[in-house]
Every structure is written in C-alpha cells, then in structure tokens.
Image (cartoon, rainbow, N blue to C red):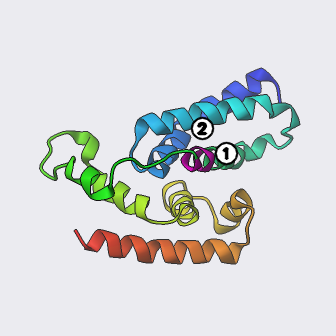
C-alpha cells in the first residue's frame, strides 16, 4: 500500500473509526483521540505488509481495539467509581453528557462484549467480520453480543 492509498483509506474511514473509539472509550474523547493517533501510526508503519485494501476498515478497527486494550492495561484507577459518578450531574446542560448513561453502562461490561456490541450495532459489521477482528469464533461473538445486550439492559434499566 502506498502512502497515498493509506491517506485515502484513512480519510474515508476516520469519522466512523473515531466514533467507534469514543464509544469504546466510554465517551472519553481525549483518550479516543490518543488511541486513534497511535493506531494510525501503527497501521502506517506496517502498511507495507498489508495486502487487502478492501479490508482496511476491519484492519484499522482491530488495530484500534488492540491499542485500546494495551493502553487500558497500563492505566491505574486513582478515583473510585462512585466518586467519579458524582462529578456528573444528570441535569447538566452540557451536550457532552448526552450519552453519559450509555458510556457508563458500556464501561461496566467486559472489553470483548463492548467491542462486539459497538461493531455490530454502531458500525454494522457482521458476526463473521467481528470474529475475524477479534481472532475468535462466530459463536463466541454471538455470545458476547448476547451477554453484552443483557448486561447493558440491566445497567440502563437501573437509572
């Protein structure tokens, strides 16, 4: 893949990729931007070995997901969840909190379930494509989707 091809693929997918990462990062747009930047750097450095330009979306989403997981492994929580939850009031007029309940619910489910739910419902990927991205079976993705829906339903109905 040439530099020009890489740039055109990035331009074509960057909005959907960023939307996916913001949801994966539970609304933390600064973290999503960091993950996106690092993902694009990793992708660019390995684009010489990439041979399927028609699967660029799946490739960059997988890189983004793995970058997110690697970043989360190095983070240590210093504030308790309940303390952080009190910082956001439900009556805030700021639009950035419009999806706060969803982001909080997504943050409570395991990463594999979160990725499966986001890719299936938000990005429209098939179960087979998600299985390829996660290097797992289609049955495992179906199980992640089922459990993810159940967990989200429970977390969102509590509010």
Give the mark count.
2
Which of the pair 144/75 is nearer the observer? 75
Q: Mark 1 points at which residue?
A: 57
Q: Give the range drawn in magenta.
A: 68-73
Q: Name the residue under label 2.
A: 13
Does the magenta segment cover residue 72? yes
Of all residues shown, which one is farthest toward the top? 4
Q: Position of residue 35 (x, y in %)?
A: 56, 38
- Residue 112, picture quadrant: bottom right
Residue at image position (58%, 43%) is 71
User: Nearer the N terminus, badge 2 or badge 1?
Assistant: 2
Q: Position of residue 77 (x, y in %)?
A: 42, 49
Residue 91 placement, left or right of 52: left
User: In terms of secondary structure, what is the magenta stretch mainly?
Assistant: helix
Residue 112 placement, left or right of 128: left
User: How far, Cα to Cα, is label 2 from label 1?
Assistant: 7 Å
Which of the pair 90/6 is nearer the observer? 90
Residue at image position (52%, 65%) is 110
- Residue 136, picture quadrant: bottom right
The secondary structure type at the circle numbered 1 is helix
The secondary structure type at the circle numbered 2 is helix
Q: In which quarter of the image is the C terminus?
A: bottom left
Residue 90 placement, left or right of 76: left
Q: Say if 106 sits above or below 150 in the image.
A: above
Q: In which quarter of the image is the N terminus?
A: top right
Does the magenta segment cover residue 102? no
Residue at image position (67%, 49%) is 62
Say if mark 2 contacts mark 1, CB within 8 Å. Answer: yes
Q: Position of residue 130 (x, y in %)?
A: 66, 61
Q: Where is residue 117 in the image (x, y as percent from the top left)?
A: 51, 64
For label 2, the crowd category at 10 Å Cα-Cα, with few meaning under 14, some 14 to 19 and many 20 or more, is some
């Amino acid at each position: 893949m040439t530099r020009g091809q890489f740039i055109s693929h990035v331009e074509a997918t960057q909005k959907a990729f960023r939307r996916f990462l913001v949801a994966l990062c539970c609304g933390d747009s600064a973290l999503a931007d960091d993950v996106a930047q690092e993902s694009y750097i990793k992708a660019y450095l390995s684009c010489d070995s990439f041979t399927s330009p028609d699967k660029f979306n799946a490739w960059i989403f997988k890189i983004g997901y793995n970058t997110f997981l690697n970043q989360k492994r190095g983070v240590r929580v210093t504030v308790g969840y309940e303390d952080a939850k009190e910082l956001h009031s439900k009556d805030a007029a700021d639009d950035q909190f419009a999806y706060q309940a969803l982001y909080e619910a997504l943050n409570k489910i395991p990463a594999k379930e979160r990725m499966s739910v986001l890719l299936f419902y938000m990005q429209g990927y098939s179960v087979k494509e998600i299985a390829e991205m996660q290097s797992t079976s289609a049955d495992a993705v179906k199980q992640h989707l089922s459990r993810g829906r159940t967990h989200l339903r429970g977390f969102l109905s509590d509010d």
